[in-house]
């Protein structure tokens, strides 16, 4: 028996439930892409599936809409895979265990995949129907969005004729998203030139920081553990003699690091501990309002001979002078972070120091200048620079017909104005708009909570409302 069969809209949740049975984590989109092409064949709809597992399904306009502009309805096929320690589901091979809890659909022990399975389900329900009035539809399902918008970047935009696109990958029904940041990765690899040093090993651990998403939460003033470690080292370097054995913090470029570790070698370990403790107690008081759970630990280890970092001065320079956080706010959209960066990963191995920055901007020119700024910083150190993972921003369009129509329909249906916002995170609209000149995009979606975690949940009532809004937009696209 179907778990979601009692929910409205029935066909949307039917497809969502079917999608939940298919393993479709990032990098594993083949099965769900085939599910979409099987759907198209069953309903005698023309389709294309490319080598990246992107799928486009074409549906002709209904009667009376033959001369209307084609609408692209878009979502992504992949989901983020997370599960609790006691969950026995093999997410690479098995489906999800979904259930209803009040107004929410949830999954036991795993992420739900409503980001972005609910978009796929909505669009399939529209394609299936014979009684929904609409212009010609190009249903675009992209692959591997969660690991760098891989599918969108690989897509041949000549396969699409539409000039208006509704992306269904937003997470709040009362917000119409009209712009997003572009991004890139900027990494530094510096040879450490190890040398011998005798002394006592001391480990300093910074912990208890909030961390968070480097786009969505960069404006909240959350402390970056790697940057804080750079501050610590720079503060004590003139007062106490020590060498650096290793430093590490963060494991994802787009996450604000919440922990960082330093292993130092010194001949005056207890004086070193005292200086570190004084510095970090001062910091703790300073940041207590925004980081109330910040704490640290200092452990004295063994005395021995160690292979310490031979470019201590350069490491301190990079760690303490690297820009981080919000660099510029938008002058056009109130409250929007325009440009930022995040030192997401910092670590050392036997041979090299590695630093990875995640850069974001809603202006392509500002992004390029930020890369140049980091290049200038790195020119003072012997290091290798790598730039990659670039995706373009979706710049705000003030004369958007699609924005105006969605705002009008929302006000008619909800009796209030929708909030119009830009976000400092990435959406596929940026990639798609950069590949098709004049593409008019909006991003909408139902209420989702705790996305990418095992607490992820989808509002049933919100899904119904957003689906009806999209149907009304299609109806009014004559």
Image (cartoon, rainbow, N blue to C red):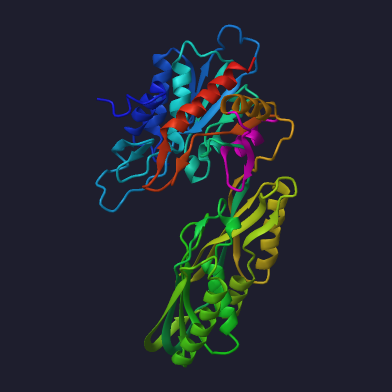
Tell me if residue 160 is in the magenta stretch: no
- Start and end of the magenta stretch? 415-437
For the C terminus, the image quarter is top right
Extreme residue in the top direction: 63
* Count of picture labels: 0
**How far across and how far down the image is residue 203, in percent?**
42, 79
**How far across and how far down the image is residue 160, in percent?**
59, 24
**How far across and how far down the image is residue 29, in percent?**
41, 35
- Tell me: residue 354, above or below residue 233: above
**How far across and how far down the image is residue 10, in percent?**
38, 22
Write the residue at 63% across / 33% down: 417
Extreme residue in the front direction: 415
Using the rendered image of the protein, determine whether residue 386 is visible from the camera's viewpoint.
no
- Tell me: residue 391, above or below residue 20: below
Write the residue at 28% across / 53% down: 85
Q: As rendered, which of 59 and 273 lies closer to the eye?
A: 273
- Tell me: residue 231, above or below residue 426: below
Q: As rendered, which of 176 and 145 lies closer to the eye?
A: 176
For the N terminus, the image quarter is top left
Using the rendered image of the protein, determine whether residue 317 is visible from the camera's viewpoint.
yes
Tell me if residue 425 is in the magenta stretch: yes
Write the residue at 39% across / 21% down: 11
Picture quadrant where residue 228 is located: bottom right
């Amino acid at each position: 028996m179907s778990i979601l069969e009692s929910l409205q809209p029935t066909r949307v949740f039917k497809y969502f439930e079917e999608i939940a049975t298919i393993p479709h984590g990032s990098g594993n989109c083949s099965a769900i892409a085939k599910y979409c092409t099987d759907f198209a064949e069953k309903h005698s709809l023309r389709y294309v599936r490319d080598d990246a597992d992107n799928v486009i399904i074409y549906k002709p306009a209904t009667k009376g809409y033959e001369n209307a502009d084609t609408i692209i309805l878009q979502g992504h096929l992949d989901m983020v895979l997370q599960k609790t320690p006691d969950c026995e589901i093999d997410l690479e091979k098995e489906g999800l265990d979904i259930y209803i809890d009040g107004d929410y659909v949830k999954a036991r022990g795993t992420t739900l995949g409503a980001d972005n399975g609910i978009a796929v389900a909505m669009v399939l329900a529209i394609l299936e129907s014979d009684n929904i009035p609409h212009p010609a539809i190009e249903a675009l399902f992209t692959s591997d969005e969660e690991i760098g918008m891989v599918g969108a970047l690989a897509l041949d935009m000549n396969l699409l004729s539409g000039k208006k696109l509704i992306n269904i990958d937003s997470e709040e029904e009362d917000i119409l998203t009209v712009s997003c940041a572009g991004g890139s990765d900027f990494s530094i690899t510096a040879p450490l030139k190890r040398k011998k040093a005798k002394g006592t090993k001391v480990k300093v651990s910074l912990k208890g920081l909030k961390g968070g998403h480097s786009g969505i939460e960069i404006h909240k003033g959350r402390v970056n553990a790697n940057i804080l470690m750079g501050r610590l080292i720079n503060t004590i370097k003139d007062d106490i003699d020590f060498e650096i054995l290793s430093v590490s913090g963060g494991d994802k470029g787009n996450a604000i690091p919440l922990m960082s570790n330093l292993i130092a070698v010194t001949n005056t370990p207890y004086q070193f501990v005292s200086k570190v403790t004084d510095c970090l107690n001062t910091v703790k008081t300073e940041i207590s309002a925004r980081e109330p759970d910040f704490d640290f630990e200092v452990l004295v280890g063994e005395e021995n001979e160690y292979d310490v970092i031979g470019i201590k001065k350069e490491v301190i320079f990079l760690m303490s002078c690297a820009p981080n956080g919000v660099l510029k706010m938008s002058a056009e959209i109130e409250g929007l972070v325009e440009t930022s960066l995040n030192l997401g990963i910092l670590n050392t191995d036997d041979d090299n120091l590695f630093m990875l920055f995640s850069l974001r901007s809603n202006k392509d020119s500002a992004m390029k200048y930020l890369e140049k700024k980091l290049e200038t910083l790195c020119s003072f150190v012997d290091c290798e620079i790598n730039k990659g993972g670039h995706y373009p921003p979706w710049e705000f369009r003030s004369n958007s017909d699609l924005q105006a129509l969605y705002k009008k329909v929302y006000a008619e249906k909800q009796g209030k104005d929708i909030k119009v916002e830009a976000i400092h995170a990435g959406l596929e609209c940026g990639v798609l708009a950069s590949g098709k000149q004049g593409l008019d995009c909006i991003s909408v979606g139902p209420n989702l909570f705790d996305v990418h975690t095992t607490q992820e949940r989808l509002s049933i009532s919100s899904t119904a409302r957003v689906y009806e809004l999209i149907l009304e937009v299609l109806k009014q696209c004559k």
